[in-house]
Image (cartoon, rainbow, N blue to C red):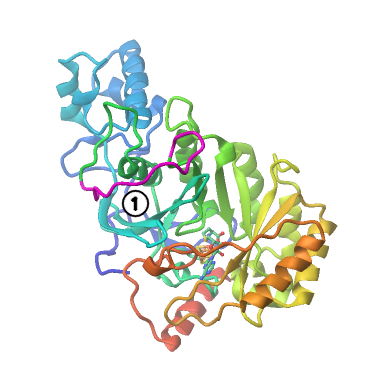
């Protein structure tokens, strides 16, 4: 954490979820709107209906407010414009009226980094001074944006750098959608006539790695934070991302990853409907309790049953099980066989993603050897379950899974142990 991460004005809130609430500072949001010093209202992250309400409150009649909201929504999320004067189908006299009362915000960019493998990472800052990160990973056939849901994380998976951040705040809807908007800005992907490149590095991206001509084709909620502990904001943000008149990304191209917040999983399927990834990482109670401590609250059996019940899961839409490879911890042949047994027992339409552990300063684990990872993968593959080994991306800029942590302060092992103990006490 940087010292800019001071407590915002909003005071303390409890992260929603059935798990014992953890006190975290709250963004001062009122009815979806974060107050600004200049009194104008930031429309970023608001749905059509709320925009219409605000226009009506500002003086338009109901019908005009509805029409203008529809137009503005389209300009905001489909065209990516950040100034009302660019909204050419809105009367010229109306545009300054809007400009006086409203803004179209983006998170501030503190730093933009480019990995030698093409991965890009942005350090972003909220209006109240909290830093968080987003990562773009280009591949031959797709471009994936890894989006954060919280500043830090209240959970403390032992292998994850984000879990060592003490301060946590839920990101607002605008800050979550804002990441996708910024990525589109940076990639120059808005339809002609819209968008702004202000504040972004102007490096050219080579195109050609997207089947449909787009660079940003997929979104994974796998950045900082536990998305199911910020359920409402993540849901509302993804609704805008999926809106046909907004960012228009298919739910099939969006994956939400959870460490296993069981009570929210069905709701995620019902209300958001995106693909599910589950951070399983271990197949025995002892080991999962140690490395993914939320396991003490919701055990493996309960978690896998919730996966079996996940709305929309099928052989065509499999659940991804993430499994980080930790040397001598969870990587034996026996672990692989138990993984197969569990996935079969719950009859899960599953694929397994084997993630080589990405190290960070002070991390208490090592990555399994390549031979070990291959042997593990083979056992799962031979049982008929896909188990590719994920190639780490952006390691040189600390953009790989689990390396995200803003302004990485170096903590000693003893300090880390103390922090873990504190967080675990909060978990109950
Ligand atoms: N909180 C959510 C989503 C963010 S983490 C979750 O835990 O699922 C995204 C993925 O990166 C998770 O599977 C997480 O377990 C994994 N991860 C965390 N730290 C890692 C590390 N150091 N090396 C490799 N993967 C890691
Ligand atoms: Fe939080 Fe996910 Fe990291 Fe665990 S792995 S500490 S849930 S971000």
Q: Left or right: where does residue 198 sit relative to residue 387?
A: left
Q: Position of residue 5 (x, y in %)?
A: 29, 64
| Disc 1 Cβ-to-ligand 2 distance below 8 Å | no
Which sits in the foreground, 303 or 421?
A: 303
The image quarter containing residue 89 is: top left
Q: Left or right: where does residue 251 sit relative to residue 151?
A: right
Q: Is residue 34 magenta?
A: no
Report if residue 186 is visible in the image.
yes
Q: Residue furthest bottom?
A: 414
Q: Residues within 10 Å of mark 1 (few under 14, many from 20)?
A: many
Which sits in the foreground, 42 or 254?
A: 254
At x 44% / y 25%, what residue is drawn? 245
Report the residue marked by disc 1: 27
Report the number of numbered marks: 1
Please tell me whether residue 390 is drawn above or below residue 372 in the rendered image. above
Q: Position of residue 340 (x, y in %)?
A: 79, 63
Q: Is residue 209 magenta?
A: yes
Q: Position of residue 288 (x, y in %)?
A: 66, 72
Q: Which image quadrant: the C terminus?
A: bottom right
At x 34% / y 66%, what residue is drawn? 406
Which sits in the foreground, 244 or 118?
A: 118
Secondary structure predominantly adopted by residues drawn in magenta: loop
Please tell me whether residue 231 is drawn above or below residue 396 in the rendered image. above
Quarter of the render that holds ligand 1: bottom right
Residues drawn in magenta: 199-214
Q: Left or right: where does residue 1 sit relative to residue 314?
A: left
At x 29% / y 46%, what residue is drawn? 204
Q: Position of residue 23 (x, y in %)?
A: 44, 63
At x 30% / y 20%, what residue is drawn? 56
Report if residue 339 is visible in the image.
no
Q: Which image quadrant: the N terminus?
A: bottom left
């Amino acid at each position: 954490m940087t010292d800019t991460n001071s407590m915002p004005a909003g005071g303390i809130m409890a992260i929603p979820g059935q798990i014992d609430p953890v006190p975290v500072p709250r963004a001062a949001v009122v009815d979806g709107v974060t107050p600004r010093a200049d009194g104008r209202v930031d429309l970023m992250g608001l749905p059509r209906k709320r925009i219409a309400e605000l226009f009506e409150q500002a003086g338009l009649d109901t019908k005009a407010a509805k029409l203008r909201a529809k137009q503005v929504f389209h300009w905001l999320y489909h065209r990516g414009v950040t100034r009302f004067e660019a909204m050419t189908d809105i009367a010229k006299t109306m545009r300054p009226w809007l400009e006086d009362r409203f803004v179209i915000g983006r998170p501030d960019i503190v730093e933009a980094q480019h990995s030698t493998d093409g991965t890009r990472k942005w350090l972003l800052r909220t209006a109240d001074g909290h830093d968080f990160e987003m990562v773009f990973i280009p591949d031959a056939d797709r471009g994936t944006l890894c989006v954060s849901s919280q500043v830090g994380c209240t959970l403390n998976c032992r292998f994850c750098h984000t879990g060592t951040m003490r301060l946590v705040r839920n990101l607002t809807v605008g800050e979550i959608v804002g990441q996708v908007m910024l990525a589109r800005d940076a990639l120059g992907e808005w339809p002609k006539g819209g968008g702004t490149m202000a504040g972004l590095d102007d490096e050219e991206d080579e195109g050609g790695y997207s089947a449909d001509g787009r660079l940003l084709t997929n979104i994974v909620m796998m950045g900082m934070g536990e998305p199911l502990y910020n359920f409402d904001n993540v849901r509302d943000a993804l609704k805008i991302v999926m809106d046909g008149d907004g960012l228009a990304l298919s739910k099939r191209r969006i994956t939400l990853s959870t460490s296993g917040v069981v009570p929210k999983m069905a709701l995620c399927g019902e209300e958001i409907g995106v693909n599910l990834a589950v951070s399983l990482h271990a197949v025995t109670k002892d080991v999962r309790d140690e490395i993914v401590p939320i396991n003490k609250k919701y055990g493996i059996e309960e978690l896998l049953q919730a996966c079996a019940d996940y709305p929309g899961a099928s052989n065509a839409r499999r659940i991804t099980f993430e499994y980080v490879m930790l040397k001598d911890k969870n990587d034996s042949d026996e672990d692989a066989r138990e993984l197969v047994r569990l996935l079969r027992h719950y009859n899960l339409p599953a694929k397994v993603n084997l993630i080589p552990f990405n190290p960070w300063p002070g991390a208490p684990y090592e990555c399994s050897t390549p031979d070990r990872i291959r042997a593990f993968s083979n056992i799962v593959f031979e049982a008929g379950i896909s188990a590719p080994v994920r190639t780490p991306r952006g390691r040189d800029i600390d953009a790989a899974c689990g390396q995200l942590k803003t302004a990485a302060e170096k903590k000693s092992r003893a300090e880390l142990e103390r922090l873990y103990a504190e967080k675990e006490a909060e978990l109950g």
